[in-house]
Every structure is written in structure tokens, then in C-alpha cells.
Image (spheres, helix red, strand yellow):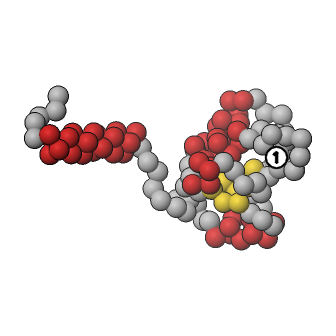
Amino acid sequence: ENLVIFRDLPRDDVRFLIAEADIGLAFYDEYAWSRWGFYLSSLKIVEYLNNGLLTITNVEGTPVQRSARGFLKADHPQQAVEAICRFSGKEPPGPPLRTWADAAGETAALFERILADEHLRTGSAVK
């Protein structure tokens, strides 16, 4: 009862609806001639995932998409329905989102470990 279908919306309205949504549905027909294996905007999956939506699709997705929090490939309609019913506006399933601060901290730790290893190997300070 809370599913609404819109057509031909201006981009600003689409942006608003995605930001307000909990779940994004990105279903595609298969097209062998398409380099992605499906036709229409593959950006739907990217937009939905980047906005923190539980993203249900019928395609494999890229390796990055498959590892993303909230990505779910539904092999049949009932699987999609069950996922929607389980999801009650909570955080999408999966590990927490990685922030730029997380990436910077991991990069700094890597550099520190490399510098420490070089110092142990040569016995001198590395600049």
C-alpha cells in the first residue's frame, strides 16, 4: 500500500525521492547486446547504494556493488518481497559504511607500518 510509481519526474524530484526512500528497486531486463548485460540506467544501483538504501536488483552488479552494504540480488520476485517485508526502515544489512576518515586512518597506518619496517630493516630513520 505504500508503493508509488512516478513517471517522467524532473531530476530534482528524483534526487529528493531517493534521499527520502528506504529501499531502491533496480530491476532490469536482460539484453545480450549490452556490455552490462542489461539495459537502462545502471546508475540506479549506484545512486541507491550511495544514498544508503537497501538496494534490491535482479542483476549481479559489479564487484564493488556486490560488496556494498545494502546490496541484494533477488533471483526471483518472492525473494525481493521477503527482503522488503524483513526490512522495516532499519539500517541496510551489512557492515557499517566506510568514511573518508576511515580510509585516511587505514592509509596512515599503512605508511607507519612501512616506515617502521624500513627502520627495523636498515636500523636508520626513514624520512
**The C terminus lies in quadrant:** top left
Residue sitting nearer the eye, 113 or 2: 113
x and y percentages locating residue 85 in the rendered image: 68, 69
Relative horizontal placement of residue 105, taking residue 93 as reference (left or right): left
Q: Is residue 21 visible?
A: no
- Which image quarter is the N terminus in? bottom right
The residue identified by callout 1 is: 37
User: Please, is residue 21 above or below residue 11 in the view?
Assistant: below
- In-front residue for pair 40/9: 40
**Total of numbered circles in the picture?**
1
Image position of 11 with respect to 65: above or below: above
Q: Residue 102 location, x and y as percent?
A: 36, 45
The residue that appears at 56% across and 52% down in the rendered structure is 68
Residue under the image location 69 percent in, 50 percent down: 61
**Secondary structure of the residue carrying numbered label 1:** loop
Task: Please state which amino acid type lies under the numbered disc 1.
Answer: Gly
Q: Is residue 71 left or right of residue 3?
A: left
- Residue 33 lies, with reference to residue 73, above or below; the image says above
